[in-house]
Image (cartoon, coloured by chain):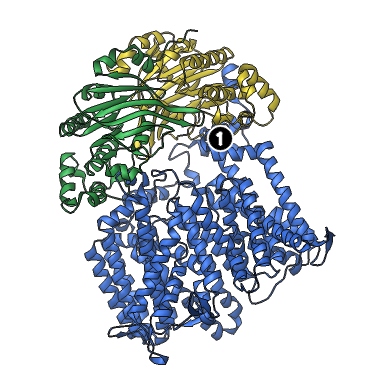
Chain colours: A yellow, B blue, C green
Amino acid sequence: MSETLAGALGVLPEELLAPPVLELVGVRASYGPIEVLHGVDLTVRAGQVVALLGPNGGGKSTTVKVACGLLPLTSGELRYGGRKVDGISAQDTARLGVCTIPEGRGIFANLSVRENLWLATGTGVSRAAIEEAAFGRFPILGDRRNQLAGSMSGGEQQMLALSRALATDPAVLLLDELSMGLAPMIVSQMYDTVAQLVEEGISVLVAEQFARTVLPIADVAAVMLQGRVTAVGSPAEIDADLSTTYLGG
Amino acid sequence: MELFLTYTIVGLVLGSVYAIAASGLVLTYTTSGVFNFAHGAQAMLAAFLYWQLSVGWGLPVPVAFLLVVLVLGPLVGVVLHRFLMHGLRDVAEVTKVIVTVAVLLGMVSLSQWVWDPTEPRKVEMLFGNSASVELFGVRVRYHEIICLVAAALLAIGLRLLFTRSRLGVTMRGVVDDPDLLRLNGHNPDRVAMASWALGSGLAAFAGVLVTPVAGGSLEASMLTLLIIDTFAAAMFGRLQSIPRTFVGALVLGLASTYLLAYAPSSWDWAGNVKTALPMIVLFLVLLVLPQDRLRGAQVRTRERSRVPSVRQALGWGVAFVAIVALLTKVADPLMHGSFVAGLAFAIIALSLVPLTGYAGEINLVPLSFGAVGVIVAYHVGIVGSGLASRMGWVGLLAGTVAAALVGGLVALPALRLRGLYLALATMAFGGLVSTLVLTEIHPRSWFGWEGAIFPTGTIMVPPVQLGPFDLDSDATAMIVLAAIFALLGTGIVALRNTGYGRRLVAMKDSPAASAMLGQSLVRLKLGVFMLSAAIAGLGGILMAASAGSVSTDAFMITASLALVMLTVVGGVGYVSGALFGGMMVGMGFALVNGTFRDLALTHDAWSPVLGSMGHLFAVLVALMGITVNQNPSGIVHQLCGGYRPLLRARPVLYVGAGVAALLVALNLLGVIGDWWLAIALFCVVALTPVLGQVWMAERVLPPEQLEAHAARRRVLPVERRGLDAPMTPEERYDLDVALGLPPRPLPSHDVEVALAGGVPLKEAVRG
Amino acid sequence: MAEHPLLQTRGVTVRFGGNVAVDDVSLDVAAGTITGLIGPNGAGKTTLFNTVTGMQRPSAGTILLDGQDITRRSPARRAHLGIARTFQRLELFLSLSVRDNVRVAGDIAKARHGRSFDVDAETDRMLELTGLTAIAEEEVAAIPTGRARVVEVARALMTRPRLLLLDEPASGQTEHETEEFAALLRGLADTGLAVCLVEHDLPLVMQLCRTIHVLDRGRVIASGTPAEVQASPEVIEAYIGQEVVA
């Protein structure tokens, strides 16, 4: 519940916090017979960036998959804007304003840059406007508008994926391992963009194994180990224990 | 030159029709992952519908044409996707293949039911057969121009669809990454449905266009197989690329026309080669396709097979032979023949157990390997002459070995590739046997050997004689065939219990892990395919020999498909599944048709209804295949599963046995006929477990099902709701609506409400 | 390092489209030791395993087993030469029991080990060694992941490999199971087997391995003893990430 997060944060009483936009309450989820999330509680409030940290295999990606409706939960609750939406399909989350960039690249490799952008738009949004916004933000994409997305470098692919968030004007952005396989320079550019989106009022949940790349822009950090959230706190608190969490001291 | 132009145009027209059909096939395959073996049947059905509308009911041609191509064709696609293909994304390849094969068979049966095949029907070209213009000194019919223009427009249209339209780009997105498409707010199922509608529309289009081009007469099997030729064109594009598919289709169309046009007149086989050309091309393309990446278990299949021990199998085998021996004593001798046929088909079906049941590979044409066995046995194995002639063991052996060798040759090009390609290769082989081998009914010189491969189209195969056993008498044949079936079955079970059998299953479960342990997948597949072909060859010889004569019709592809489908329905992982499949094909149809024919003779007034029962049965059988996805382990498995709990409810078993005994007694007293007895016994066997569930539920049903039943019974009467138990949100919602109040939101409806009201999150969050 | 390097990769590079998954990797795995391969997600560890086992052709570079170039050999052939592996996403034979999963590996290996290789006896011994005897008759689909990982190891060992590649064998295991598993691996290495371990349970890797290679974005960024690796700033950076200078 949200109370637990507030309690864990120990900063503000519930009423003073921004309203929650995305909540996972006691969420359990399984791949086939194997349960991988054993009761995850997590809240993203309006305008917040919540960083979900922890080593591989801790359940970060699975948590994102549950949050965006790709993986059904076996028990617990998923809420958007305070509404219970368990069993929502991934296509409906997108239409409700939750934009997800999944692990790996969130692009269609065999489609051109423009076609990728096109798929990102809901009906009724003009293609030209989307392209303008995306190419304005990332001019390199404009240069490659007719190139197949799969043939671009990792960084360019990730720019394209982020352009979807720009195109759909989402309320919540779910990012899974945005930095995977990217050079630090590019990663920092990506998170700059994310920070700008936050300025525009988007709330963000970002699962990231490279803790230090994301902590500077995070408002709240949570650590996941073995399918559970083991710690929630301010970025500074979490940062202090990172080495132990990852390398086992 | 003019002649060349004429041939070129004819070839291009044929190629255009191929292209229209093949692009639909590729479209549905890439977007939904299901290769539609029924594509040809859909085209065929469309041609018949078009005939019915335009000729039968006299609608104007344009109306009939548009109705079929734009409305009925796509509608069939939507229905197929909604009810069948939709659920096939994560199932084993065998299941996917069998479901579409069942649709094919169902459509063929349906068309033969509705449109009596003995009545000739002609479809004219659009604008009539004679409407034509002269172009460059060549006479071209309007219909041909339409074909060419349609294909060209389709090529342009598809290009625009895939690059300019949202739907088309979404279709390509589905191929790339369905999950990501979901996250972009699109529904992959809806996209797949659209592609099925489009693909089926194209099938219908091709069906209507091709009939007059191919001569104009409507014939269900012929039309179905004609479109199957387009598989080769689709293979050009590796079942993925539509432009390459177009090229392949045009090459095929031109090549087959030129072949026929320019072959020397002494090549009287050129016509057959022309018919077989797509299949030959399919093999050639297989040879050059690059090897597949080694794959892990992509699908967590739901098929589960209990493996009996050899001792158990032997026990069942002995019991089976004993029962059959008993049957020879009590059953009407007139039934013996179809019983023998059933057993022979069951032996052919056994070939699928190691191949498909254990190794997960598919052979769609076991009867064609049977044909190879028969032909070789016929030419080398007959001893004696006249009535005293017999098929000796040399013939059996030679036919079996020949089938195995041919099987190896057929499978070899496809073994590096996915299972679907092997299935397609076998289909192509079936086509080759039908068009090139079984058509060799006149003598000619073969590298020094003078004679016909399949003399006169019907060959006389004398009864088998194995040492002391002369299968001239049907009773002996029944017992010996039952014994052969039992022996082979036991052998196959024994094989499953050896290291070889375990390796087959391991390969099916995870090719990647198998290869990593050092298994050469190609060698293993080759071996099991040859074994399977050998069994099919042996079964084929036994079938031909027990029937006395066999015509080319016996080896039709559709017969093979029915046998494969019914074996999978019965349970391809089990010897009993093969028995089910073989008996259904060899005996079931004869049984049902015989019963209803007898009835029709005795009840004149009902004869039209009773006469169509056979057709109904054929369609129902196809429906069984369509449901194979619900029960991938097979009917026999399910039936045995139904009987196991009955051991705890013996009275039910006694009742079942009692009814069966009563039926047998009635039969012996002459009150009911043999056909009725067989059908009634079948019902008793099927219904006894159901009786158990109703009568002694507490002993038969597992606890969780009992609980579910009890819960259903606890449902409160309407007037007590809200009093004895608190109202559920759904009931409250219904009540609100009924009273005309603004309904309080239903939790599960939140999503719908939210979606209907725009983007609520942003409003909720940003105010 | 006195040990003979059993496996050597030399300049192995794997490209997928515009991405380089494995970038010029040269490393050795010695017989009789456990070598760790660690790195963040997407670093290319599994891809490297795939090139060593032959599931993936490298775009450049060579792979040597015992000095012999095996770059172009088929997966099955490499298994015959003594390479065995487990899979990160389990690849068990789901229609078979635990015993038969192990036994079928022996069935396959029998071809090269000859008549003296008694599959049934060897299976019993392997089940005993890996502590699976108690669940030998169960359906492999029904056992917990931790045990399933051990079944994969037992299956790989049945081929009597010289080189064993383990892809995240400890994930899904309980603490107790991990301890037992560590003991098993040590015992195997003592018999002369070369073990290469990809694992996210870093304490386990630190405890087991003599040499550790760290992969990041397809490149080897550090190699050395656990202590050296743990102290390396590049490694800490690779794992925890560089601070973004906003």
Total number of numbered discs in the rendering = 1
| Horizontal arrangement in the rendering, residue B382 relative to residue A160 (left or right) | left
Asked which quadrant contains residue B402, the reply is bottom left
- In the rendered image, the quadrant that contains the N terminus of chain B is bottom right
Q: Residue at x 44, y 66 (%)?
A: B366
Quadrant for the C terminus of chain B, please. top right
Q: Give the residue furthest to the bottom.
A: B387
Res. B395 visible in picture: yes
Residue under numbered circle 1: B181
Residue A110 placement (x, y as % from top left): 57, 35
Name the residue nearer the viewer: B22 or B732: B22
Where is B150 relative to B225, above or below?
Answer: above
Image quarter of residue A73: top left
Q: Amino acid at mark 1?
A: Leu
- Determine the chain carrying the residue at label 1: B
The residue drawn where x is 42% and y is 8% is A11
Instruction: Judge by depth and name the residue closer to the eye, B473 or C163.
Output: C163
Could you say where residue B455 lies in the image, as x and y percent from the top left?
51, 81
- The answer to which image quadrant residue A143 occupies is top right
**Mark 1 element type:** helix
Question: Which residue does the image show at 37% across and 14% down from the upper left?
Answer: C237
From the top left corner, tell me how far across and down residue C225 is, in percent. Answer: 24, 18
Number of residues whose C-alpha sits closer than 10 Å to that of mark 1, classed few (under 14), some (14–19) or many (20 or more): many
Depth check: B225 or B754 in front?
A: B225
The residue lying at 69 percent from left, 30 percent from top is A124
- Please say whether residue A103 is visible from this viewpoint: no
